[in-house]
Amino acid sequence: MISIPPLKIQELEAKIPIIQGGMGVGISLSGLAGAVAKTGAIGVISAAEIGMIYEKGFMKDPQTADSKALKDEILKAKDIANGGIVGVNIMIAMSEFFELCKVSIDSGADIIFAGAGLPLEVPHEKLRKSKTKFGVIVSSSRAATLIFRYWDRHYKDIPDIVVVEGPKAGGHLGFKLEQIDDPNFALEKITPPVIEAVKPFEKKYAKDVPVVAAGGIYTGEDVYYFINEIGVDGVQMATRFVATHECDADTRFKEAYMKARKEDVVIIKSPVGLPGRAIRNKFLEDVEEGKKQPFKCLWQCLKGCDYKHAPYCITQALVNAQKGRFAGGFAFAGANVYRVDKIVSVQELIDELVEGYLEAAKINA
Ligand SMILES: Cc1cc2nc3c(=O)[nH]c(=O)nc-3n(C[C@H](O)[C@H](O)[C@H](O)COP(=O)(O)O)c2cc1C
């Protein structure tokens, strides 16, 4: 019988091999992550400036507000998930990376995905005393090798899962501007070397480390292709999960996805020094024309943010967008956002993806 294979991360098993990628700021909270986990896929809360979404108490003490909001969201998502797998995405670039890892572990998150940097220094001892797994997000085999070598030397251990994020992803990208459209850096090209890079470490530690592909995966046929032709154990998808009723963003954010045309999808230079993919709007046009001015920073939430010269606060712009206030912000989105034409429930989306996978499997049987 043809079926979709589960995604195994050591003793964790997701019956649907799809991870809903973490989306900051506030786009994937407990509503989305819990609903995804409930279907048997993996739901992920983004920890990025999570306290700012709650607003209350944030201005007085941002770090405490972030920790408290993250704990609340994990507990809520676990409740909705009904035993499903709930993860947290924490950017290494965040000043409070360590603290948020600890909160996630203490609150019973099943897995932490660390992106936007190399997760070398991590609260390893605490992690391994818990059941929480640790995933790394990379955009090259070089980064994967660097992380695995470091963990091997310093912790006598390796991470539990690797997500390879290609240049069609939404949000901040781990590529140079000129690499984004270069076919040599396409997801299907950069993934096999990561699978190979991880193999010797899997052998040394007698441990299976699943590799998952992300960025531009849109249909069930795409999921089939990456699992069966490229050889990954699962996929991570984000853009499609924005167009669900359960996504935690304001309806106007989801409408921006439905309205986006191909020519509206642009690459911006984010104040944190990385390129990012977003939907063009008046706010971004004003930035381009130099109409935005440096601002007063509340606290340096992102390590690499050059806020003294940045024309706007990226966190504030993303919070505004999450709340539908596009006069003061813009939406990050994946390269395929222009294909979004309706909002469905998370279960309907998962059903469609599984059906597409099974159809492709039948054709290729
Ligand atoms: C609105 C939005 C926000 C995102 N925020 C984050 C984030 O905070 N941290 C992160 O590691 N990835 C982030 N991503 C990347 C996704 O987790 C995911 O890996 C990627 O978008 C997958 O490509 P797809 O959107 O084409 O499916 C974001 C993506 C989107 C669309």
Image (cartoon, helix red, strand yellow):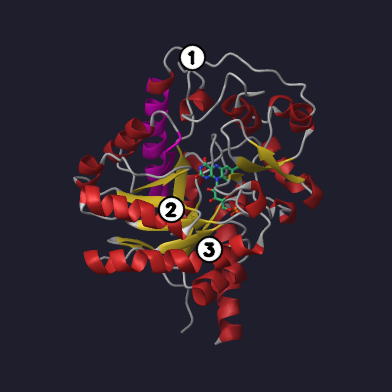
The magenta region covers 64-93
Marks 2/1: CA distance? 36 Å
Q: Which residue is mark 3?
A: 190
Q: Which residue is mark 1?
A: 59
As drawn, is 66 to the left or to the right of 343?
A: left
Closest to the observer, 15 or 48? 48
Look at the image and say whether residue 72 sits in the magenta stretch: yes
* Residue 238 image point, x, y percent: 57, 51
* Residue 144 image point, x, y percent: 40, 56
Q: Amino acid at mark 3?
A: Ile
Secondary element under disc 3, as helix, strand or loop, is helix
Q: Amino acid at mark 1?
A: Met
Marks 2/3: CA distance? 11 Å
In this rendering, is residue 137 above or below 30? below
In this rendering, is residue 208 above or below 248? below
Secondary element under disc 1, as helix, strand or loop, is loop
Mark 1 CB lies closer than 8 A to ligand 1: no
As drawn, is 165 to the left or to the right of 265?
A: left
Residue, x 71% and y 53% (percent of image)?
Answer: 340
* Residue 246 image point, x, y percent: 56, 45
Q: Which mark is residue 143?
A: 2
